[in-house]
């Protein structure tokens, strides 16, 4: 008989070490790649009828958003 994972395993959120690893990977990327990751995660989190977003996609979206926010706050203000 074929192995079928339980629904809990399919929508398992990142553990703390996994999330920290994802955050480190994203921190090492340039801003353009980080923005692409954010937009892809945003698209993956769209609500479509009866399909809800996966926990990992939401965690990735929030992590990318926080890193973009952190990057924007680090930059010196523009002087026009």
Image (cartoon, helix red, strand yellow):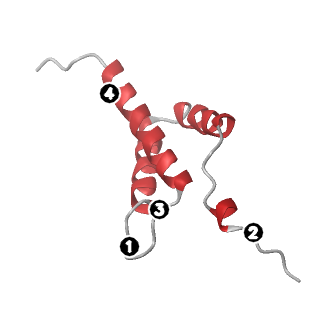
Q: State the SS at label 4.
A: helix
Say what secondary structure mark 3 lies in: loop
Location of residue 14 by image quarter:
top right
Q: Which mark is residue 48?
A: 1
Q: Residue at x 60, y 50 (%)?
A: 13
Provide the residue designation for mark 4: 72
C-alpha span from label 4 to label 1: 31 Å
Structural distance between the alpha carbons of marks 4 and 3: 27 Å
Percent x, y of residue 69 = 35, 31
Residue located 51% across and 54% down the image: 57
Disc 2 designates what residue? 5
Rendering quarter of residue 44 = bottom left
Spatial CA span between label 1 and label 3: 9 Å
Q: Do labels 4 and 2 touch, CB within 8 Å?
A: no
* Mark sitting on residue 53: 3
Disc 3 to disc 2, C-alpha distance: 18 Å
Q: If the image is split into quadrants, where does the C terminus sit?
A: top left
Q: Position of residue 66 (x, y in %)?
A: 41, 34
Characterize the local packing of mark 4: few (<14), some (14-19) or many (20 or more) Cα atoms within 10 angstroms. few
For marks 4 and 2 on the same chain, the one whose residue lies earlier in the sequence: 2
Is 29 placed left or right of 77 in the picture?
A: right
- Earlier along the polypeptide chain: callout 4 or callout 1? 1
**Foreground disc of the pair 2, 1:** 2
């Amino acid at each position: 008989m074929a192995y079928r994972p339980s629904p809990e395993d399919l929508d398992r959120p990142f553990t703390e070490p996994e999330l920290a690893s994802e955050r480190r990977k994203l921190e090492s990327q340039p801003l353009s790649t980080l923005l692409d990751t954010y937009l892809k995660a945003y698209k993956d989190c769209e609500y479509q009828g009866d399909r809800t977003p996966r926990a990992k996609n939401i965690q990735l979206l929030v992590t990318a958003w926080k890193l973009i926010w952190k990057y924007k706050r680090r930059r010196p203000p523009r002087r026009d």
